[in-house]
Image: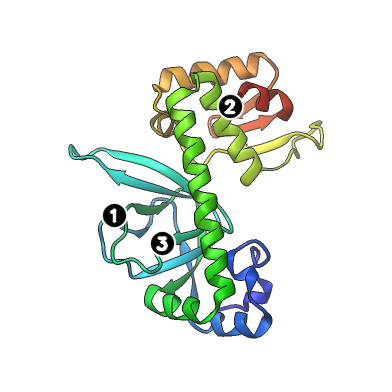
Amino acid sequence: MSSCETCLVRNRAICAALDSQEIGALNSIGRNRALAPGESLIWEGDDSVLVANVIEGVLKLSTGTEDGREQIVGMVFPSDFIGRPFGSTTGHGVTALTEARVCVFNRRDFDAFAREHPALEHKLLQRTLDELDRTRRWMLLLGRKSASEKVASFLLELADRVATPGCAEGASPAHIDLDLPVSRQQIADVLGLTIETVSRQFTRLKADGIVAIPGRRQVIVLDRAALAAEAG
């Protein structure tokens, strides 16, 4: 495993709370793992045997309904922590949406390490509370926001977490390039909408000059302030 000191998310992941000696100890119990799109890391209902930091890529959190359908309940991005430390089973599956790289730890080894390092436990608690806040915002989005607000909120979340500055020919540096990690059907499933509604909202945002859509999985945010206003 390469040194944690050169990790792309070293200063944003939970291990940012550790000093260099502690990082070395954590490095000794972890390993890098590459995931291809569609490859699963954790399966819903299985024993909780591993936890991981996301280094690169986007992964989905999903659960199955009684009739066999999949429901995406969240997405995780670089520097996010996945898995269930101090737990016996996992409540959802974790699958790569894009090519991804994760830093994986045996859950029992990680639990023992965390108990010996209060700063890491504190960071875990902080991340848990942040995730709770995001879940509450998502409940508001699903329960109260209109279709246009839902789609705009989804794009805004991606713009804040995984976007790169616009680099297309003639684009303004203020523009934000998004490579969508999910299809429009999956966006519809996540937001509780139909694919037709999602497509109409994309078309309207484009017509209003808020976004450009050069490809099926590409969106360029032209006016972030206007997108934020659309998100309510």
The x, y position of residue 55, in whole percent, is 57, 62
According to the picture, the residue beneath numbered tag 2 turns out to be 152
Three-letter amino acid code at the position of disc 1: Glu
According to the picture, the residue beneath numbered tag 1 turns out to be 44
Cα–Cα span, label 1 and label 3: 11 Å
Is residue 43 visible in the rendered image? The answer is yes
SS for tag 1? loop
Do the CB atoms of the residues marked 3 and 2 lie less than 8 Å apart? no
Q: Residues within 10 Å of mark 2 (few under 14, many from 20)?
A: many
Give the number of the disc on residue 15: none
Which circle's residue, 1 or 2, is located before the other in the chain? Answer: 1
Is residue 183 visible in the rendered image? The answer is no
Three-letter amino acid code at the position of disc 3: Gly
Give the number of the disc on residue 83: 3
Q: Quadrant of the image for the C terminus?
A: top right
Cα–Cα span, label 3 and label 2: 29 Å
Three-letter amino acid code at the position of disc 2: Ala
Quadrant position of residue 90: bottom left
Q: Residues within 10 Å of mark 3 (few under 14, many from 20)?
A: many
**Residue 106 versus residue 214 in the image, above or below:** below
Residue at image position (56%, 80%) is 27
SS for tag 2? helix
Residue at image position (52%, 44%) is 133
SS for tag 3? strand
